[in-house]
Image (spheres, grey):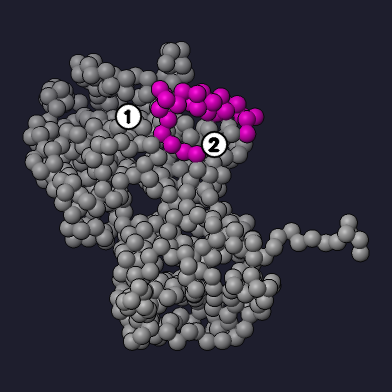
């Protein structure tokens, strides 16, 4: 064979695997998370992360250090054929799916080799245990150029002892040895770091609510190899940067939520291919007044400081967490939380990395300092033929939403004082609303809200009104909100804010005894008129706009008694269409 015809390897096995070790996991906890992803995808109910530790001499003293790390689950397990391929680069069982946590065929190999030179994988279904492994030193020496055939074996004795012999009828064990990439070798320190990271990353799989992530039992166990005993164990509890999930892992909380929703979660439809859409969901929370009152130097306040930022969550699992340019040096930023949920179908638009460590290319855009970038994004967003069209549209829309919402939350937070009671005037009814409702109460025209109120008990009305007050006045404590609700329980008309797609800028809801007009904060009407008046500081103009809107709400409430409510919905929808269309004639 001539040199011209000689076959050349596309990749040298050792060099390729060694390069894979440098993929950039933030720490050991995020590398372990890749294995937890696989366990969740395999429908495991119980996942145990085990550190196998022993004493070893270090600089003339004996130190208790981690020797091996394992992740054990009771999931579906793998067939011998699947096990034999699981360490092959680019191979995975979920490469074509856009629904679950996996997709890239990268996690097991990339995470394992970033932390250890030897990775062993055991899996079993209906009894028989099989094993495969990848040993980097053997590959370097030329003794392992191909994946080894699987062999029937038994689970390592120390692993079985670490979990008290509780092994599922099926499952998988990944064992890392020859550790050289672990960030902390002291078990207690590694436990602390893993606990904080993993409790946040998997919070939706650890809380009591199965609506977004089915609950799993995930625990950390440190096993003392010298004395053959469990040295420490911890069950993971959710570390929620929105502080809404229960049971909470934060201090001085009794496991209860310490934040409240700032407003109801809302969705933004995102086009990712021509004619194809997927919703992202935005959730906002703000500390309860009594929480903020404890101050930043309290144990709870310090916990909040470590959890300050925006969380991007993909299929129930956190992908990235940080400031993304939305935070400044103001320490009061800790008292709000934002979570952005999206599905794997939007991976490319969010720039999800193959090791699921980051989203890429998203940050807050400052009109002054980022003018050129904003101009380029606008051009791409307006041109469907531009390769960055969909990503630019998402970037701009998400920036606009988060900027408005974070500023609104911070405005509320700044009205409070840490270590003291909130402004008592905030617990008093708004004078304009009070006068409007006094006038309305003198009119005895029958309304739909009257009919609706007849179906509710006084207790139900108070609960509805209290919930409404907490939504519209998040600066109030629950006690103050209930007092406010009692004082305004007889209100017949009121206003609130909501968020939904489309041009309809006003909706109608019944709360306690009142008809409530709900202003759509995503409508052009809100952006170009309502918000402009709010930001102007002209209280008289804002009051006039509120009175104008409440007058309409009252009118519809009266006529809905005799006319079909669907007619009014169609009317408001068409009204919103024309308002949005004609507002285009007003310059920015």
How many residues crowd mark 2 within 10 Å: few (<14), some (14–19), many (20+)? many
Residue 496 locus on image (x, y percent): 27, 32
User: Dot 1 corresponds to which residue?
Assistant: 519
**Residue 202 in which image quadrant:** bottom left
Q: Quadrant of the C terminus?
A: top left
Q: Secondary structure at mark 1?
A: strand
Indicate whether 484 appears above or below 18: above
Q: Position of residue 75 (x, y in %)?
A: 49, 73
Residue at x-position 55% and y-position 53% = 354
Range of residues picked out in magenta:
361-387
| Position of residue 358 in the picture relative to residue 332 (left or right) | right
Dot in front, 2 or 1: 2
Tell me what residue is drawn at x 60 percent, y 86 percent: 152
Q: In this picture, is 531 found above or below 135?
A: above
> Dot 1, crowdedness within 10 Å: few (<14), some or many (≥20)?
many
Q: Position of residue 494 (x, y in %)?
A: 22, 30
First of labels 2, 1 by sequence position:
2
Task: Identify residue for label 2.
Answer: 391
Residue 379, magenta (yes or no): yes
Q: Is residue 279 magenta?
A: no
Toward the right, the furthest residue is: 1
From the viewer's perspective, is 563 left or right of 422? Answer: right
Q: Residue at x 43, y 36 (%)?
A: 363
Q: Where does the image place residue 178, in percent across and percent down from the top left?
A: 49, 73
In which image quadrant can residue 263 be found? top left
C-beta proximity under 8 Å, tags 2 and 1: no
Image side of residue 138 versus residue 326, left or right: right
Measure how far apart labels 2 and 1 are at the Cα level. Answer: 28 Å
């Amino acid at each position: 064979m001539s040199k011209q015809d000689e076959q050349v390897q596309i990749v040298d096995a050792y060099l390729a695997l060694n390069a894979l070790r440098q993929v950039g996991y933030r720490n050991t906890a995020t590398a372990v998370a890749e294995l937890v992803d696989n366990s969740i995808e395999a429908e495991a109910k119980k996942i145990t992360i085990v550190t196998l530790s022993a004493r070893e001499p270090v600089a003339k003293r004996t130190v208790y250090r981690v020797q091996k790390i394992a992740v054990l689950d009771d999931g579906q397990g793998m067939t011998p054929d699947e096990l034999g391929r699981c360490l092959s680069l680019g191979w995975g069982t979920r490469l074509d799916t856009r629904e679950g946590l996996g997709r890239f065929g990268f996690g097991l190999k990339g995470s394992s080799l970033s932390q250890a030179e030897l990775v062993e994988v055991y899996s079993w279904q209906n009894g028989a245990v099989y094993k495969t492994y990848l040993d980097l030193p053997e590959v370097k020496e030329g003794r392992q150029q191909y994946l080894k055939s699987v062999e029937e074996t038994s689970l390592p004795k120390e692993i079985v002892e670490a979990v008290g012999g509780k092994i599922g009828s099926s499952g998988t064990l990944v064992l890392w040895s020859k550790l050289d990439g672990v960030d902390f070798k002291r078990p207690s320190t590694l436990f602390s770091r893993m606990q904080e990271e993993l409790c946040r990353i998997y919070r939706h799989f650890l809380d009591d609510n199965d609506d977004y992530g089915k609950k799993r039992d995930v625990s950390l166990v440190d096993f003392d190899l010298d004395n053959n005993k469990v040295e420490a164990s911890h069950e993971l509890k959710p570390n929620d940067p929105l502080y809404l999930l229960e049971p909470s892992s934060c201090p001085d909380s009794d496991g209860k939520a310490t934040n409240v929703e700032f407003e109801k979660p809302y969705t933004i439809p995102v086009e990712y291919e021509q004619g194809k859409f997927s919703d992202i969901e935005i959730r906002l929370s703000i500390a309860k007044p009594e929480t903020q009152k404890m101050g930043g130097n309290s144990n709870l306040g310090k916990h909040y400081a470590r959890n300050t930022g925006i969380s991007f969550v993909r299929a129930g699992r956190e992908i990235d967490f940080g400031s993304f340019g939305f935070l400044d040096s103001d320490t009061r930023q800790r008292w709000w939380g934002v979570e952005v949920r999206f599905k794997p179908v939007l991976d490319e638009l969010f720039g999800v990395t193959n090791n699921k460590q980051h989203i890429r290319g998203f940050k807050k855009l400052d009109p002054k300092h980022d003018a050129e970038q904003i101009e380029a994004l606008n051009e791409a967003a307006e041109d469907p033929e531009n390769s960055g069209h969909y990503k630019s549209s998402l970037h701009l829309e998400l920036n606009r939403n988060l900027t408005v919402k974070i500023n609104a939350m911070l405005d509320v937070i700044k009205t409070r004082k840490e270590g003291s009671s909130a402004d008592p005037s905030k617990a008093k009814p708004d004078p304009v609303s009070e006068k409007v409702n006094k006038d309305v109460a003198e009119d005895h025209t029958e309304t739909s809200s009257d009919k609706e109120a007849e179906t509710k008990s006084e207790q139900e009305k108070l609960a509805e009104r209290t919930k409404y007050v907490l939504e519209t006045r998040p600066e109030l404590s629950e006690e103050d909100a209930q007092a406010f609700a009692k004082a305004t329980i007889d209100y017949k008309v009121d206003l609130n804010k909501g968020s939904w797609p489309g041009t309809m800028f006003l909706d109608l809801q019944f709360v306690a005894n009142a008809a409530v007009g709900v202003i759509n904060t995503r409508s052009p009407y809100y952006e170009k008129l309502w918000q402009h008046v709010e930001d102007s500081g002209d209280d008289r103009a804002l009051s006039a706009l509120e009175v104008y809107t409440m007058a309409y709400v009252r009118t519809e409430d009266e006529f809905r008694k005799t006319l079909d409510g669907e007619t009014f919905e169609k009317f408001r929808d068409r009204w919103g269409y024309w308002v949005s269309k004609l507002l285009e004639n007003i310059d920015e």
